[in-house]
Structure formats: C-alpha cells, structure tokens
Amino acid sequence: MTPPNTFTGAALDRAGERRSDDGWVAAQRADPAARAVVAGREGVHVTGGEAPRLALVPLAEAGDGEPLLLGVGDGGPIFAAEGDASRLSLLGLREAAGALPQAESGLAAYAAALLNWHGATASARTAARRRRSGRRGTCAAARAAPPSTTRARIPW
C-alpha cells in the first residue's frame, strides 16, 4: 500500500465562489474567530515541545502584512500570514511534515505555497514594470549595465 502524501489533508472550504467578493473577504478578516498560519522563508510557526503542533494565531496578532485567505475551517476563517524567524518559532516545512499531524502538514504546505506564490508573482510584476519603464535594476551598477547582462530577480 502506498503511504499517504504528507502534504495533503488540509480540510478547508477554500470558498472559491466567494473569495472574489471583497466585502465577504473583509468580513472574514473582521471575524473574531479568524486565525492565521504564520510562515516565512525559514518555515511555519509551530508550538514548542516534543510533539509540535501548527500554531493558528489570532489574525490580529499575525503581523503587519496583508493576510491571504486560505479558506474556512470548522472554527472560522483561516488565513496565511508572512512571519519572521527573529520573533517566532519557525520549523522548516520538511521537518514540519514529519512532526505534525497530516491535516496540519497539509495546511502548513498550503499556506507556505500561497505565500511563496504571492511573493513570487509580486516580484515578477515589479520586474516587468521595471523592464517596461526602462529601469534595469535598483542600484547604480545595475542601471549602468548593458541590458544583456541584467536579469530580473525572481525567487524561484
């Protein structure tokens, strides 16, 4: 028998038919039951201990960045929020996969993927705007370089 994929199992209603409704999404953000999976480059926020669990923090405490709607769970709306390892306990995604229950691993992977995609597409949009405007970089050396040696920095 094939073992289950560790990163599947997030049981959320992703609210595909409602997520384009700005008013509905704003109401989900304002819901006192709203929680966030906090993730960053270093991993996902977990509670400490020998048996770590995925930390679902109140949305108001999730950070300054714009939270991204993951979906609606049994306890209310769940968002992904960018986190910082300097102030949070982050566990690498691969380590989390082995340590967390399958449903939490799936939710952690979904949050990390959405945040990475959101950041990558924002970087790509910025690079495209720079190309259209004739800017080839942000430092003097990059602006002085011939176009053939300048590359957009896309983090994937």
Image (tube, helix red, strand yellow):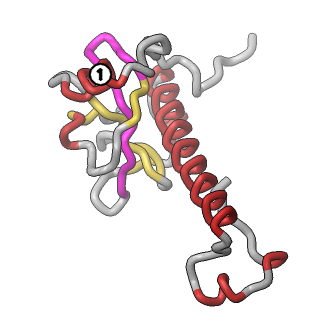
Q: Name the residue at 15% across, 24% down.
A: 32
Q: Nearer the viewer, residue 154 or 148?
A: 148
Quarter-of-image position of residue 44: top left
Pointer 1 residue: 23
Work out whether 55 lies above or below 74.
below
Q: Is residue 53 magenta?
A: no
The answer to which quarter of the image holds residue 58 is top left
Residue placed furthest toward the front: 133
Q: Which residue is located at x 52 percent, y 26 percent?
A: 106
Neighbor class of circle 1 (other Cα within 10 Å; few <14, some 14-19, many 20+) is few
Pick the residue in front: 82 or 16: 16
Q: Seen in the image, is 30 located left or right of residue 88?
A: left
Residue furthest out toward the right = 148
Q: Could you tell whether 121 is left or right of 82 in the image?
A: right
Q: Which residues are magenta?
A: 71-84
Q: Is residue 118 left or right of residue 55?
A: right
Which kind of residue does numbered mark 1 sit on? Gly
- Residue at the image position 19 percent from the left and 27 percent from the top: 30
Query: In the orientation shown, which residue stands out farthest toward the left?
Result: 32
Q: How many marks?
A: 1
Q: Nearer the viewer, residue 132 or 81?
A: 132
Q: Quadrant of the N terminus?
A: top right
As drawn, is 4 to the left or to the right of 106?
right
Measuring from the top left, give residue 150's x and y in whole percent. Answer: 75, 75
User: Relative to the observer, which residue lies in front, 85 or 59?
Assistant: 59
Magenta-colored segment: predominant secondary structure: strand
- Residue 28 placed where, x, y %? 27, 22
Name which residue lies at 69% across and 65% down. 131
